[in-house]
Structure formats: structure tokens, C-alpha cells
Image (cartoon, rainbow, N blue to C red):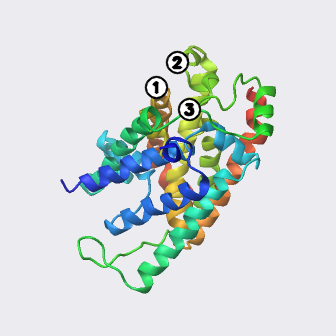
């Protein structure tokens, strides 16, 4: 059982992500998670404000079911299929995070300094989570896809716009990681 | 029952995101510092295998489960929005450590704070919808 309970190496995980994408293709759908944000906005009545949210919601129901499954999968994976929650990040990453003030980098899936309930007592945490989430929601829709829709589905289909978007993901990610995050911690 | 297959794929996707550690803020931070091959190996091998799969589907004109010819839509050739929107997403990805799949998976792992991220992501998508006609694509 250890091969399931231990973290899955990239050469197992990567092909399985391709399997997820190809399964949805054989079900007649397209793998892309960020569309769900648009669907949820539409369900919340956003169509009253912008025509972008006026579309056939029913045709997107399957993707919301994938989201529901993903939540269940997250619960099962973290509660029953994990020996330890440690994330085996490299020694140099641990060192960099310690210098930024993180106590036990890699001891849990998420840094408690940012995502624990205690951390929500700090206005700074709220600012980070809200700004981060907002940029993700705005950026993916503006770019026309996220890691699943552009990086996996789009690149697999040799789409140049997806390559441009992935280059954008890295421009933003590198600026945040190297220039902005060190100022915040 | 026709949604059972989508629920199954979703559950598998959620487990996979946890077990591959791609849901971890730490892995994203490490990736953008180029200090491990892990995330590049995942995305690289997923795309390599995915590209072979898509090429075979096109070559043999395969049909989906309902018997219809599989059509794989091309992405709109909006390079301006791809680079600007992509960069905006990248900033958020590295800050909140979660893209639009993992944010739901993390709720399942018990990360209550993710509701704040999801709420803000919905707001971001809504604001994009409002500004869409004024933005360069």
C-alpha cells in the first residue's frame, strides 16, 4: 500500500493528469477548471450585470460535478490515502522560507502562516487571500483558461495562444515569487 | 446517473492533486524558484502524453462515448489577453498558491481559508465579465 500512501512521483502523477484530460475528452467534454468560476457567477445572477454571464448553465453542469468530485477527492486523498502530510520540498526552498519567517516549511500541505484559522486573525492574511484569489479569477478568465485549460489541454493540442498564456503564468509567478513575496514576509 | 462518470473523474482528479502535491503552496513557490524538477516533470509528462493522445484521436478520428466524432476546439487567437491575463493569473497563483482546480480540492482537505480565495476568485471573474468589452484582447 505504500506506493499509494506515499507521495506520487511526477512520472506517475503527470501521465495520470493526461488520463484525466483524455477521459473528459472521451466523455465529449473539455478539461478546464476555471470555467466553473464563470458558471458559478452566472448561477449567482451575474447575467443581470454582464452578457458574459448569459449562457446555457445546464450545459456546464457536468463541470460542476467534477468540482464536487474534486472536493471529495481532496478529502479522501488527505484523510485516508496519505502516510504523512509532509511536502518534500528542496533544502534550498526550506532555507529561503525560513529566512522569510516561515516556521516549518513543508511540514503540511499549506503554510499555516497563511492558511490556518489563527492566521485569519491578521488583516494581512485576508489581504493576501483576497488579492490572490481575485487575480486568479480575473486573470484566468481574461487569459481564457488556467493550468488545466491552457497548460494541459491547450499545450496538448499544440495551441500557440496557450503557450503565450503559460509564458504569462510564469511572468506573473516569477514577479510574485522573487519580487513581491520577499517584501511581504 | 449520467453524471456519475464526471463525479468519478472529479474524485480521481482531487486525489491526484493531493497525492502529486500540486495542491501545495510550497510546491508552487519551489517551482517558481526553479529549485525542483517535480512540478515541471508533472506538467511536462502530462503534456507529452496528452499531446500523443490528442494526436491519435485526430489521426484515427475517434468518437466519444455517445458515438459523436470528438472535436477538440482551438483556443481563440487572442495573444494580448493571453499574455496579460496569463501574467495576472500567475501573480495570483504564486500568491495564493492555488489555481482554479486545487482551490476546491483544498477545501476538501480541510483548508477553510480557501473559501476566502474562492470567493475572491468569483469576484475577480465577475469584474472581468463587467470590464470585458473595455479590455484589449
Vertical relation: A90 (above or below) A21: above
Q: Quadrant of residue A179?
A: top right
Q: Chain of mark 1?
A: B
Disc 3 versus disc 2: nearer the observer: 3
Viewer-side residue, B2 vs A174: B2
Viewer-side residue, A130 vs A99: A99
Are dots 1 and 2 in contact, CB under 8 Å? yes
Identify the element where label 1 is drawn: loop
Q: Position of residue A147 (x, y in %)?
A: 54, 54
Residue, disc 3: A84
Q: Would residue A69 appear left or right of A85 to someone viewing this image?
A: left
Which quadrant of the rendered structure holds the C terminus of chain A? top right
Q: Quadrant of residue B81?
A: bottom right
Q: Position of residue B101 (x, y in %)?
A: 47, 46
Identify the element where label 3 is drawn: loop
At horizontal 76% and vertical 47% (from top left) the residue drawn is: B35
Q: Position of residue A3 (x, y in %)?
A: 52, 47
Q: Would residue A89 appear left or right of A45 to someone viewing this image?
A: right
- As drawn, the label of residue A117 is 2
Vertical relation: A115 (above or below) A154: above
Q: Position of residue B92 (x, y in %)?
A: 61, 41
At horizontal 30% and vertical 49% (from top left) the residue drawn is: B7
In the rendered image, is residue A137 in sight?
no
Vertical relation: A101 (above or below) B60: above
Q: Are discs 3 and 1 both within one chain?
A: no
At horizontal 63% and vertical 48% (from top left) the residue drawn is: B90
Amino acid at each position: 500500500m505504500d506506493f499509494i500512501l506515499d507521495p506520487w512521483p511526477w512520472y506517475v502523477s503527470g501521465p495520470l493528469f493526461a488520463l484525466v484530460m483524455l477521459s473528459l475528452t472521451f466523455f465529449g467534454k473539455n478539461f478546464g477548471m476555471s470555467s466553473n468560476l464563470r458558471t458559478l457567477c452566472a448561477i449567482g445572477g451575474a447575467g443581470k450585470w454582464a452578457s458574459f454571464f448569459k449562457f446555457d448553465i445546464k450545459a456546464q453542469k457536468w463541470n460542476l460535478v467534477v468540482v464536487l468530485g474534486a472536493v471529495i477527492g481532496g478529502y479522501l486523498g488527505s484523510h485516508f490515502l496519505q502516510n504523512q502530510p509532509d511536502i518534500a520540498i528542496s533544502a534550498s526552498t526550506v532555507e529561503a522560507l525560513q529566512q522569510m519567517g516561515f516556521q516549518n516549511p513543508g511540514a503540511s500541505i499549506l503554510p499555516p502562516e497563511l492558511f490556518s484559522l489563527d492566521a485569519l486573525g491578521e488583516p494581512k492574511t485576508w489581504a493576501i487571500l483576497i488579492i490572490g484569489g481575485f487575480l486568479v479569477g480575473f486573470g484566468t478568465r481574461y487569459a481564457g483558461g488556467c493550468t488545466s485549460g491552457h497548460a494541459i489541454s491547450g499545450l496538448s493540442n499544440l495551441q500557440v495562444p496557450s503557450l503565450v498564456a503559460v509564458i504569462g503564468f510564469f511572468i506573473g509567478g516569477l514577479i510574485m515569487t522573487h519580487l513581491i513575496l520577499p517584501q511581504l514576509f | 446517473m449520467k453524471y456519475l462518470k464526471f463525479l468519478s473523474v472529479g474524485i480521481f482528479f482531487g486525489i491526484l492533486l493531493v497525492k502529486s502535491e500540486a495542491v501545495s503552496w510550497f510546491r508552487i513557490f519551489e517551482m517558481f524558484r526553479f529549485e525542483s524538477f517535480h512540478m515541471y516533470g508533472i506538467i511536462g509528462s502530462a503534456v507529452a502524453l496528452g499531446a500523443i493522445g490528442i494526436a491519435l484521436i485526430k489521426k484515427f478520428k475517434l468518437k466519444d462515448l455517445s458515438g459523436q466524432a470528438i472535436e477538440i476546439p482551438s483556443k481563440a487567437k487572442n495573444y494580448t489577453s493571453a499574455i496579460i491575463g496569463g501574467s495576472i493569473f500567475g501573480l495570483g497563483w504564486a500568491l495564493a498558491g492555488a489555481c482554479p482546480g486545487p482551490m476546491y480540492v483544498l477545501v476538501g482537505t480541510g483548508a477553510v481559508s480557501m473559501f476566502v480565495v474562492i470567493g475572491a476568485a468569483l469576484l475577480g471573474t465577475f469584474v472581468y465579465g463587467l470590464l470585458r468589452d473595455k479590455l484589449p484582447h
